[in-house]
Amino acid sequence: MRVLFIGALNLDNPPTGGEEYKNRLLLECLHREFSILIVDTYKWNKRPLILFRLFSEVFFYKWDRIVLSASSRSVYRLVSIIQYFPFIARKCVYFVIGGFFPSAVESGKYKIKPYNKLRSIIVEGKGHKLNLLTSGCSIPVNCIPNFKAFPAQEPFLDKCDSLFRFVFVSRICPEKGVREIIEASKLLIQDGYTNFSVTFYGPIESGFVDEFNASLNPILRYEGQLDILGSPELSYSVLRSYDTMIFPTSWIGEGFPGVIIDAFVAGLPVIASDWNMNTEIIRHNDNGIIIPSKDQLALSEAMRLLLSDRGLCRRLAYSSFSCAFHYHIDKVCPQIIEAVKK
């Protein structure tokens, strides 16, 4: 089966984000079964010739399948054109990256009609599928979770240090819940808790630098960026030194956050907001704790609970650690291949 793959890859450089990383893994998986030709849409707006090549490949060559795995905006533009060419559209399988597309369809920002000409749509969770179906999607919608190619897990590490270490790994900005983490930590400090730390890893949003830096102290620390994509073994070793990950996001584009898989690999329970797919991945009081989004008081109470009950944290951590393999590329790849073949 001959497959045309359209998506951002940036193959000549290390991946700069989750989209490129996931597309590279998706491509690796597809190569196991199919003959693949690639159209790399990375920074396509600065590479005008890529559009000529894209349309040449789509319209003038015969493909058994066309896999679309670009940004939702780019796919929307392409689908708006190919909907008028049924012989092409019915070969297209759209792998949705993140959670913006389902919410955009639900809100009416994107019309579902052009997508109903495609062969199928692949989303990362049941909530996303429901959003599309209730918005009038009439083609098959399959759920395949996010996945990673992480190294073999080390044995579960049972920590007994007197200092409880929380960690946050993502873009450092208000939409990812950083303000809530800062305010929740202040509440704990006001209540006399000093036996904990919160360490932040990630790029700081330009408009948030001064506010974030002003909040740092011996308990709230910034350690730069953790290169999980480029140096996974070292990064997971660093993550394993922490006790719990905090992820109180309320970002509109949140899908299946890869950082939650990273927490599972490192054996960390996750305190996560009830935002988008978090509730599908985190089972409350099993492999983590779910709290209302944008609620610093609820976050402080969840942090206090784990600070005060090491046994509970240990139980959640082990359950988290046991979930990791479900999201390894070798586990998910057969689902991907089958979804493209259908």
Image: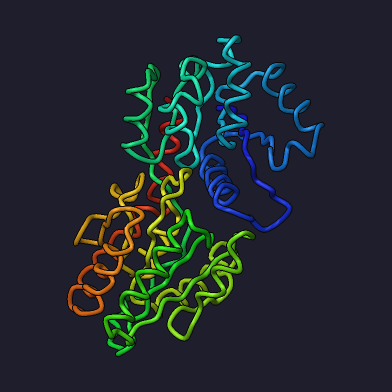
Residue at image point 73% right, 52% down: 12
Taking the image as shown, residue 70 lies to the left or right of residue 307, namely right
In x, y percent, where is residue 23? 57, 44
Task: In this rendered view, identify the residue nearer to me: 298 or 229.
Answer: 298
Q: Quadrant of the C terminus?
A: top left
Taking the image as shown, residue 201 lies to the left or right of residue 47, namely left
Q: Residue furthest bottom?
A: 162
Taking the image as shown, residue 217 lies to the left or right of residue 39, namely left
Q: Residue furthest front?
A: 190
Task: In this rendered view, identify the residue nearer to me: 300 or 41.
Answer: 300
Please identify the quarter of the rendering in which residue 122 is found: top left
Taking the image as shown, residue 150 lies to the left or right of residue 85, namely left
In x, y percent, where is residue 306? 24, 74
* Up-down relation of residue 316 to residue 161 (above or below): above
Residue at image point 20% right, 80% down: 308
Please identify the quarter of the rendering in which residue 225 is found: bottom right
Residue at image point 45% right, 55% down: 258
Way the structure is coloured:
rainbow
Q: Quadrant of the N terminus?
A: top right
